[in-house]
């Protein structure tokens, strides 16, 4: 099983390119997010795009995966968005990943793994030594993915309070 | 949280076997490595066999091989074969008559319980193998980063 997984990843390595997002990709990102979450949020994504391609670009990363050699049914296969955040509650600068998704029909092909590695490289280049994210406790798929990439529980806990009480 | 010895042994045995699925390992070999009786380990392996996670190999030098899916088998899947790790307080049926203090404490215990289960449910045998490999290579990796 692991041999098969490795083989398919090798094929994917030859056919997938990870690069910075461009204007033409944005609608495809919005579409993937809508398919995955069931909620369309074009204004949110346009705002993220505007901020991540024009300001503090040396520490903000909006990357997409695309098929390299062939015309794919899906122009964008996945995306990852993260930025360097510093001194929130005393935390030293760290790479914060806050959006990550792979086209549902192209999963289990190593695309998420390559996106994860690509943003890790960007953070390392920016001098960052720790990468963080947040994941829904009941979302075992996402939790298992980040764990398999080597992420572990960090020193901060996310807390919340219902303001209706 | 403290896991029962059977759960811990089962995880160790699966890691041992899944690290090389082609290799067959005897109960005594694993028993010696983790300093546990062959009798206790045999019972653990039997349970893992019934769950389809290991397969016994007969004949001279027989033993066990890994037969599960390392990328789909979580620590929670293994632990649940041997023990129920749900907190006792979370399983209380008598919620109607509980005092506010009992209710508040139950909420705290449930919160801890859910975090523990989510963590164990998200870590697969494959992830454990990767983690072990990473810790073996830690020194090398730090050298690379420094350079």
Image: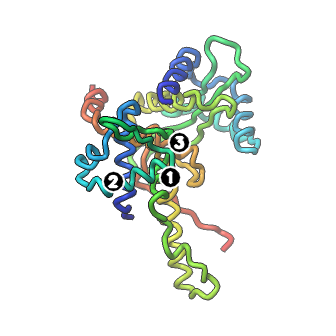
* Element class at badge 2: helix
Judge by depth and name the residue closer to the eye, A25 or A115: A115
Along the polypeptide, which appears first: circle 1 or circle 2? 2
Asked whether disc 1 touches disc 2, contact meaning CB atoms under 8 Å apart, the reply is no
Judge by depth and name the residue closer to the eye, A113 or B121: B121
Q: Which residue is mark 1?
A: B77
Q: Could you tell me residue A148's position as x and y percent?
A: 46, 39
How dense is the environment of label 1, judged by Cα within 10 Å: few (below 14), some, or many (20 and up)?
some
Quadrant of the rendered image containing residue A46? top right
> Do we see residue B131 in this rendering?
no
> Do we see residue B74 in this rendering?
yes
Say the numbered circle drawn on residue B72. Answer: 3
Which chain's residue wears label 2?
B
Q: Which residue is mark 2?
A: B41
For the point 53% across and 62% down, the residue is B114
* Element class at badge 3: loop
């Amino acid at each position: 099983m692991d041999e098969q997984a490795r083989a398919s990843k090798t094929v994917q390595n030859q056919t997938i390119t990870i690069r910075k997002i461009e204007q033409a990709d944005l609608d495809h990102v919005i579409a993937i997010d809508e398919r995955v979450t069931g909620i369309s949020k074009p204004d949110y994504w346009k705002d993220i795009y505007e901020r991540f391609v024009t300001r503090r670009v040396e520490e903000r990363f909006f990357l997409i995966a695309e098929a390299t050699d062939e015309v794919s049914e899906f122009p964008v296969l996945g995306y990852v968005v993260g930025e360097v955040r510093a001194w929130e509650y005393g935390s030293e600068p760290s790479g914060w990943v806050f959006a990550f998704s792979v086209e549902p029909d192209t999963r289990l092909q190593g695309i998420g793994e390559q996106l994860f590695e690509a943003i890790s490289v960007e953070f390392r280049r920016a001098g960052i030594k720790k990468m963080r994210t947040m994941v829904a406790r009941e979302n075992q798929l996402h939790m298992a993915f980040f764990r398999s990439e080597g992420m572990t529980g960090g020193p901060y806990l996310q807390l919340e309070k219902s303001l209706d009480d | 949280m403290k896991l029962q010895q059977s759960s811990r042994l089962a995880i160790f045995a699966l890691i041992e076997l899944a690290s090389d699925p082609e290799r067959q390992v005897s109960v005594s070999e694993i028993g010696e490595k983790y300093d546990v009786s062959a009798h206790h380990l045999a019972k653990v392996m039997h349970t893992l066999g019934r769950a389809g996670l290991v397969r016994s190999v007969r004949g001279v030098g027989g033993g066990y091989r890994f037969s599960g899916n390392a990328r789909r088998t979580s620590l929670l899947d293994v632990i649940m074969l041997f023990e129920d790790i749900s907190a006792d307080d979370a399983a209380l049926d008598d919620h109607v008559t509980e005092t506010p203090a009992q209710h508040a404490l139950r909420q705290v215990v449930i919160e801890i319980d859910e975090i523990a289960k989510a963590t164990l449910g998200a870590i697969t045998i494959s992830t454990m193998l990767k983690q072990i490999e990473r810790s073996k290579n830690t020194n090398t990796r730090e050298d690379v980063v420094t350079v």
